[in-house]
Every structure is written in C-alpha cells, then in structure tokens.
Amino acid sequence: MTKPVAFASLLLLTSTLVAPAALAQTSGGGAPATNASPPAQVVSPSAGQPGTPPDTGPDASQAPDAQDEVEVSVPGASSGDAGDDIVVIGRNIPNIVRNTPQVVSVLSSEDIARTGEGDIAGALSRVTGLSVVGNGFVFVRGLGDRYSSSLLNGSPLPSPEPLRRVVPLDIFPTNVIASSLVQKSFSANFPGEFGGGVINLTTKAAPKKSFLQIGGSVGFDTATTAELGYTYDGGSHDWLGYDSGERKIPGFIREAGMNGTGVTAAQVTELTNAETSLVFENRNIPANFSGEISAGTSFDVGATRIGLIAGGGLSNTWRTRDAIQQVAIDQDGSLVSDFRNVATDHRALVNGLFGVGAEVGRHRLRWTNLYIHDTLKQAILGQGEDQNNLDLLNQNTNWFERQLFTTQGVAELKFGNLNVDLRGAYANTQRNSPYERTFTYLFSPQVGDYINNLANQSLAQIAFSELNEDLWSGSVDLGYDLDLDTPVTVQAGYAYSDADRTSFRYQFRYQALNGLDLAEQQLRPDYLLSDYNVILNNIVLQNESTSQGAAAYTASLRTHAGYFQVETEAFEGLRAQVGVRYEDAEQRVLPVGTNVTGTNLNNGYWLPASTITWNFAENMQLRLHASKTIARPQFRELAPQIYLDFESNRQFIGNPRLTDSELYNLEARYEWFFKRDQRLTAAGFFKRIENPIEAFGSPGAGSSSLLTSFSNAPGAKLYGGEVELVKHFPLDGIGLGDLFATKRAVLIANYTYTKSELDAQNQSVVNPINVNGPLIPASQLFVDGSPLVGQSNHLVNAQFGLEDTEMLSQVTLLVNYASERITNRGAIVNGVRLPDIREKPGWRFDVVWRQGIPLGSDDDKQVELKFEARNLTKTRYQEFQIFNNGARADVNTYDLGRIFSFGVSVGL
C-alpha cells in the first residue's frame, strides 16, 4: 500500500534525528513551514558521504535534472499500518531555497566546511547580501545588526555584550553548528524585529549511527606569530580563558561602587597589583591552535529511537595590531589626539554541546544544551600627543570574559493533519571585565623621562564591570492541512520571551594625597602602586563611576506575540503565504543610584506579511513580497553607561530617549533552478524606515579617545538589488583523462548593490551628546541623502572550487569585497558637524584545501586534512575621516597579516 505525502511531512520524516531542523524553516514562533506546492522529492541536506557535497556521492552522476519525474520510497515511515511505504511522485524540487514560501539562504554543514571558517560569522559573510562588521555582528543588506535577529534552534538568545541585545556570531564555532538559515523576507511566524532578516542557527543533532571525531589545527599569523607583542602575567589559567582568582572583585570595590564612595589606601593594597598592571614584551608570540572532539550514537528503546550527541572544543589565538588612532577636533582635521597603539589580543574559546533526541512514531523530541566561554586578554602600549602637544605614554591591560549557556526543549508532534510544535528555552549570558587598568605617563623635558604623579594629565585608572542576563522563552505553533481540492495550510501560534539584565561598571582613579617625589613618579606601574608606596603617599581611589552616565543599570524586555497565517496554492503554479502578527513589548532600562534618565517603552504593533510565488515555468519562479516589521533599540543603545569595546579601543554610551523604528518592506525576486543544486537568482528590494537609529562619534573624556552614542533620525529609505549564481562544471567529458573523471568545478558567486538615504526632514531630535538637554534640529546631526551607518554600496562574494564527486577532495578560492561604509556619524564640535567616520574593508582573498583519506572500507571513517591561507592580499583595516581641505584623520588603522593554518581531523 502506498500513500502520497506533502513536502512538509516528508521533510520531517527524512530529516529524522540527523537533519538540521532549521531546514524545515523553524521560527521564533517555531513552526516548520508547510508548503502547498506539488509533492516533491526531498534531498536531505546531509545526503552523500561525509565531507562530500550534499548532491554528490557514488550515484551523483545519475541525479535527475530539475524537470525529471522521480519516485522516492521511504520504508516504514507511514503513519498507517506498520511496514507501509510512502511513495512520492512529482517534479524534483532541487533544494529548500526553491521550495520554501519565503526568500531564504541556507548554509549546510558542507557549505560551512567549504568556506573553512572557524566561526559562523565568517561563514555567513559568504551569503548573498550579508557582511560582518566589528566583533561578529552580521549586517543584512546594509542594515545593522540591530535590524536583524539571531535564533538558536528557533529560540531567541541573549547577548553577552553589555550594550547589545544581539548575540555576536563570532562566538559560535563552526564545529557545533550543523546549518544556518537566513530568511530575508518576513513571515508572521517569526519575531517582528525583522528589519534585515533573521538568522537561525541549528546545532548538530544526534546521528543515525555511532561516530567519534577528533581534530586539531595550528595557525601562523605573519603579523603576530613569532613577532614582538605585549602581555602581562594575569593568572595561571589564562590560556583556558578562566581566571584563577587574581582578578576576583573585592567586596569593598562593590560596596564603594554602589555607594559612590572612594577606597582607602589600606584597601588599595588588597588589590591585585603586578599580575594585572605590569606589561612586558613577548618577542615570540605563540602560534594559534585548536582542538575538538565530538561523538554520537543512537539506539532503540522499544518503539522509540533515541539519539545522543556530545562535543567540545578549545582554541587559542593571538593577534597584534599596530594601530594609528587619531581624534579630530575641527572641520580642518586638527587633531586633539594622535596616538600609535600596539595591542596584543590573546583569545581563548571553550565550547561544549550535549543533545538528546527521540523519535516516537511521527513525533520528534529534542533537548539541546550549549555552552560557550569566550575570553580576550589584552595588553596595549601607546605613545602619542594631545592637542597641547604633550608627549604621552599609555598602557592598558584588559580581561573580557564572555559566557553563554542555553538549554532548549523542542517537541514536534503530528496528529494526522494537525502539526503541533512546542518550544521552551532558558539562556544565560555573562560578561565579566575586572581590572581594566589604564596608566598615562607624561614626558617631562626637565627630567628627561616619562612621569606619572597620579594627578593632572598623568593618570592611573581602574574599572570593574559585570553583566548578567537571563532569557526565558516559549512558544506553541499549530498547523493544520485542510482537506480541500486546493491545498490550504492554516497556521497559528503564540510566543513569549522575558529578558532581564543587570550590569555595573565601577571606575576609579588613583590619587596620591601626599604627592609623589620625582623618583617615585618615574616608577613603572607595579612599583608605583606597590604596598609601600601606597601607604607612604596615601594613594587612594576616587570614584568616577558616574562622571559619564550611570554606574549600574537594570534592563528588561518582555514580549507577547500571536500570529495567524494561511498558505495556499490558489491556482496551479501560484501559491501565496499571507499572515499577520501582533506583537506587544515592554522595554525598560533603569539606571541605579543616579539621576540619569531611564527608558520605558511600551508599544504594540500589527505586522502583516504576504509572499506570492508564481511557478511560471518548469524550473523558474517569481516571488513578490510585502511586509511591515519593527526594530527596537538595543540595550547598548539605551543604557547610559560607559562601555569599552576591545576591538576598537573605543568607548560607547547609550541614549535612553531612543524610540522604536518601523520598516515597510517590498521585494521582487526571480529564481531559475536550471540543474540540481544549481541556480541563478536576481532580486530587487526597497525599505522605508521611520526613526532609524544612527551612531555618532565624538571626542571622549580627555579627548584622547572616541566616544560613541546614538540618536534617532527622522527617516530613511534603502533600496537595491542582488544576484546569485551557483553553477557546477563536470570535468569528466573534456578529455583530461581518468584523473578528472569524478571531478567538477564549482562557481558560487553573488553581488549585492545597496543604496540608502537619510531623510533629515524639518524635525527636532535628541542630542546624543547631551541627552537631557533641549532637542536640536535634525539637520545638525544628519545630512539628507547620507547613507545609513554600516551600509556598503557594493558587496561581492565568490567561490571558485575544484572538488571530487565521490570522495572528499576540495580546493576553493574565496573572494570577498565590501565597499566603503560609515561606522559613525561625525561629531558636532563647537556647533560644527565633522565628516562621517568611514571604514574601507576592500578586497580579501582566501584559499581552503580539504582532502579526505579513507580508513578502510567504511566511508564514514576517514582522516581529513585541511589547509587554509587567509587574507592573501594583506588588506589593512582602515577607519578614517576625510575633511574638506583633504586632510585625513585615521580613527583606527592597522595592518592585518596573512594567516596560514593546517588541521587534521579523524572520523571513526
């Protein structure tokens, strides 16, 4: 007995425990997308041999073309009598990109492996219209990370960054991620914060059969490895990324921070000194290295199939940046600060994954736990001049410890025509940054040396900060296939999330109440703050925590959302998905122990969405999409608290008077699937944004660094187009002999053009430099027609590869280009608006080689060798301002080295 089955049902059956759930379009509301298209063969994303492209394998040469009729039998998968087979008859739908009712891009585990990237942010930078800015934050079609959302297995995640709500994706190593789905068109089952798109990461699930994989790699950075760098002792466990007690925050620091009081000399002697204040040279910076292990198995317990998976990894990387960092003060580009800062970053990342899956008939249950601990140890030495031509020497030591833990439960239940998806998750993020130390020494011509008298321009500061955020979320999604002549699927659901954050940053300045003699002023930092010197000269800590903003704050975001949507094939070849979402949110940021203004936003929105897909030819289709979405201010944009960004050595402070942004989205898209897993797509898109949020840079405290804040612009529009080509070229028929009989060339290329224009209008806006002051004309901050912050006009990604269709053997050239983009609006200084600060990413070329060596006759057992060569052009990082007279201020410019790495993994 055979029965026809719809695509969505077959997708759930064929994916079983191993296929990524995201490829069934899981959402923030969670429900897998159902499709009213004709029955279709499904090619599992995990098909083929390990390490082999999904559409390859021993029988790849016999794969049907897109227009072929196929018959697929899935033994024992029926919901009817035991032993029944499900037979699917229909056209071959090449992949999820075509069959989904929305505009999506999918990175399978093989796509990720082909890029060779070590974290998911790097892999996503190869997707059409996506770029990575800063510390792993993904921009979709030129819209900043605040306009997009990230999900893990369909559930939201908190961020370990103090002033962000979006999690940085560079903390996710690729060894724990099975796939990534990027949806660029809004559908009602996703969260309403969907300006640019949503990125749903799917962790690896339990396998169909047992496996064990062990791997490791070493890397060499031409600008860092075996070169001069700087470091400090810290603790004995620093290489693991965990503090061994040297940086524990004393109770008297917490008490002084909360009460706004100082710290006595006797208490100062209880602080860790030399371990966190003495920077020394390291003329042989180590090589990068990493190691990972993962294992899984599955077994039957009665009629239930149980699967287990566990894995973990450790990596250590070093990077030295010799940066020019300048701050301009007027429209002629006169510098108020001109420094050369050399920073060495030591990053240690630990990750762990444990998951359990179960299949009971047609029901699937999944419990996933993910742990990521990411630490950066930083030492900086800098020398430069301020606006008074004073010769200054700066030293900084930092320790930024970020942690993410999440546990998630998912139940996908099928009762005839009714699908029920239940999701619940808890996530916790933490960021600890104790003993942020800064020393500034002033050159004295009289002494002929640099001195620090713990007063005036020569300073010693110390800061302690902690962040903790808890996020609870849950959702229920219902889908019902109506028994009508025309395929109709009705979906409805409810989603809830509750995020609570606490954060403090206590900053103090050392002050010698008894003064220092010249000999003492020349002492290095650990001697300067020795117990003897502290007691002798009565060196105390003055509390500066509230000199700019709040010392501490609490923040929360609670959302309730419900949606209803219908998907139908109204006419043959014409299907539509239409829905609406209502989302209500209460967002609060409350400064603690200060008179600084807080935030209380309580808004609800109706968010309609419609996508129509016309399959007008055998292997071509046209999509039309329209929707309304929102973007709420992130905590980093609202919180009136100073935050130091370790990447740019720049300070940030929020604006508590920001408001929500509203977006109206239109898109038209043409898709041609001319061969299996090969396609040509072209799209045009338009977005109108009300109250977009823009970043502004201005001279910080002491004018030696840049301080960034935020403000709403009255409006903006963004439009553009993108084109993508995925093409394979078999090499068996071009007369090159047996050596190329199983080889093929692969071309994956995409280009995105984006244009955005701010509309200042004739409105008043909040001054980001003085948020409690009077409103100012928008024209003082914004110039009509200026592009949005973070938007590049041109994005190019290309992959040129040669690979084997029967075994793992790949070599790929990866090309990436992004044109100039604005990182901060120019500051207003003495009533004059300075030029915008721009970044020039430029061209980047990488090469990745992968080769599998079988171990015996089992295709799953093999050794994989991998070689990577990154940034072959040695493209520099450049962030700068250009003034009317042609002068240039390098806000943050430094050389990047070429990176070479070699890795080995063994699958058993």
Image: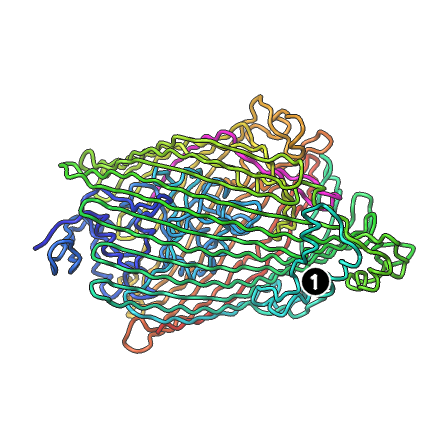
Quarter occupied by the N terminus: bottom left
Percent x, y of residue 364 = 27, 55
Judge by depth and name the residue closer to the eye, 450 or 407.
Answer: 407
At 14% from the left edge and 37% from the top edge, which residue is drawn? 484
Percent x, y of residue 318 = 59, 63
Judge by depth and name the residue closer to the eye, 48 or 670.
Answer: 48
**For residue 344, what is the image quadrant?**
bottom right
Percent x, y of residue 726 = 34, 51
Tell me if residue 194 comes above or below residue 42 in the rendering: above
Query: Is residue 902 visible in this depiction of the protein?
Result: no
Percent x, y of residue 507 = 70, 49
Judge by depth and name the residue closer to the eye, 542 or 162.
Answer: 542
Q: Mark 1 points at which residue?
A: 276
**For residue 15, what is the image quadrant?**
bottom left
Q: What stretch is highlighted in magenta?
A: 681-709
Residue lying furthest right: 446
Amino acid type of disc 1? Thr
Q: Callout 1: 10 Å neighbours few (<14), some, many (20+)?
A: many
At 12% from the left edge and 61% from the top edge, which residue is drawn? 83
